Amino acid sequence: MEKKYKISEFAHLVGLLPYTLRYYENEKLITPHRYDNGQRYYTNHDIRWVGFLLHLKGCGMSMNEIKEYVKLRSQGDSTIPQRKAWLQKVKANSLSKIKEMQFHLKILSHKIDWYDGKLNNCDYGSFAEYLDRFEKKGK
């Protein structure tokens, strides 16, 4: 028999507040199961589903995009090509953001190195001159 979790237990397991879970429910992102008395409960399957939703959110999907994805999912396997295309777009956007972040981190690292040089009385000139050295070397 599958374990059943009350909303407070489930919230703790997925790292969200009960308020957020109710919001997700209202937005039709999740559908809790109900006991005969109407009280909600969730299962391990729901934990995995919310985990996936959080991955989508973490990859930069907006709530409207996530809602559209969930809507397509609810329509069954006939929407797999659309969902796959959507996820490929999200993946491409995420990879682009990662590449941009790596560039920013590279500049930040150069700035830290430049400061280290200043603290050790090395004369690298201005930071712009210091960066020019890397561009000339192709780094």
Image (cartoon, rainbow, N blue to C red):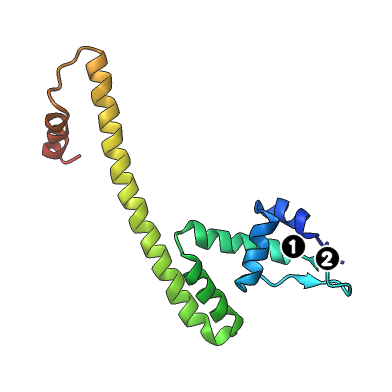
> Which sits earlier in the primary sequence, circle 1 or circle 2?
2
Dot 1 crowding, Cα within 10 Å, few <14, some 14–19, many 20+: some
Q: Residue at x 57, y 64 (%)?
A: 53
Left or right: residue 106 versus residue 41 is left
Relative to 15, does residue 49 appear above or below in the rendering? below
The x and y percentages for residue 85 are 43, 76
Residue where numbered disc 1 is placed: 44
| Residues under numbered marks 1 and 2 in contact, where contact means CB atoms less than 8 Å apart | yes
Disc 1 residue type? Asn
Taking the view exactly as shown, the residue that stands out farthest to the top is: 121
Q: Quadrant of residue 117?
A: top left
The x and y percentages for residue 24 are 62, 66
Task: Name the disc covering residue 2, or none.
Answer: 2
Relative to 21, does residue 29 appear above or below in the rendering? below
Relative to 118, does residue 138 appear above or below in the rendering? below
Q: Nearer the viewer, residue 18 or 116?
A: 18
Dot 2 crowding, Cα within 10 Å, few <14, some 14–19, many 20+: few
Left or right: residue 69 versus residue 39 is left
Disc 2 residue type? Glu
Q: Residue at x 28, y 45 (%)?
A: 103
Left or right: residue 68 versus residue 35 is left
- Secondary structure at badge 1 equals helix
- Secondary structure at badge 2 equals loop
